Amino acid sequence: MASAAPAETPTAPASWCGRGAKPRTFEKQPPVICYDKPAASIVSKEEYDNKRYQALTGDLVETLIVPKREARTWTMQEGDLCRVTVHEGSQVGDMNFWNLENTAERFYSGKTRQLHSSHLRVYDRLWSCLPHLRPMATFVFDSLAAYGIDEDGGALHDVIGTRCDDYTYKLITGKDRVGSCHSSLVKAVVEERGLTEQDVHDVWNIFMCTGFTRDTHQYFCKASPARKGDFIEFVADMNLLVALSACPQGDVSIQVGAEVPDDKCHPLKVEVFRRK
């Protein structure tokens, strides 16, 4: 009877780069912008400058102060303009948006990032979630527009970060805490609008300076360049419910998990203007 053939010895694929293996090389490929801009993402600057003018020369229908380390909500009609101002000292904010008539339609930061960029600029739009995928608001003015992209790749008003939260804080520190943008937003929407924690979603980080490190591609923050009097404005493209947290990280110059002195945190001012 013939003996069985010896079992074959498995060989490591070259990509493992074991001892003596030739390192794999990769052909260079050009970067391709994944999402060609649809017509709906490109607004008429003249039209939105005119909407801005009509609102600002109309009526101031609401003014509110978002206290430091807290959140507040407000509503807007289609065509209203909202101005958010750095009221006392450098401060960033986390924003949520819902369709006022159907809060299941809410801001979709990931798709906004794909259709525009990681950091929003004037005339970019904020988009709603699937299956709706509609413009919720259009960014129309930024007193910090000249900041651009800095030497570290940092820029302002990102749609990358997901909001600071107490669950991640505990993951990092092992300590329980209630004191984050997430918990502030939850408290505001529950108490003021009868919503739930599940209604709070990923945010637009206004005034926040962020990017990705060149060597490890880790998300970084640096102290916001926003100073007292700086502001942004956006026009509502549908009837909106809006929430804003004055982030307990203040100007975000201190790493999440470290203690943030109270004097690093400041309120934000909200004004809503309506055309006559």
Image (tube, rainbow, N blue to C red):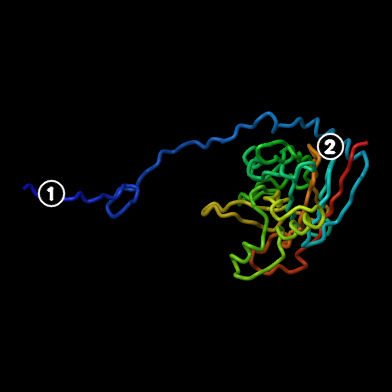
The part of the image, by quadrant, that contains residue 188 is bottom right
Vertical relation: 7 (above or below) 261: above
Picture coordinates of residue 76, whole percent (x, y)? 84, 43
Vertical relation: 163 (above or below) 263: above
Residue extending farthest to the front is 1
Which badge, 1 or 2, is on the more N-terminal residue?
A: 1
Going by the numbered disc 2, the residue's amino acid type is Gly
Q: Which one is in front in this view, the residue at disc 1 or the one at disc 2?
A: 1
Circle 1 packing at 10 Å, graded few (<14), some (14-19), many (20+), is few
The CA span between labels 1 and 2 is 81 Å
* Quadrant showing the C terminus: top right
Picture coordinates of residue 206, whole percent (x, y)? 73, 50
Of residue 231 and residue 160, the one placed in the foreground of this image is: 160
Indicate the secondary structure of the residue bearing disc 1.
Answer: loop
Residue extending farthest to the top is 39
Picture coordinates of residue 229, whole percent (x, y)? 83, 53
Q: Are marks 1 and 2 in contact (CB under 8 Å)?
A: no
Q: Residue at x 73, y 69 (%)?
A: 261
Going by the numbered disc 1, the residue's amino acid type is Ala
Of residue 35 and residue 25, the one placed in the foreground of this image is: 35
Indicate the secondary structure of the residue bearing disc 2.
Answer: loop
Task: Judge left or right: residue 93 versus residue 21.
Answer: right
Q: Which residue is mark 2?
A: 79
Q: Tell me the tag on residue 261.
A: none
Count of marks, rendered view = 2
Q: Which residue is mark 1?
A: 4
Circle 2 packing at 10 Å, graded few (<14), some (14-19), many (20+), is many
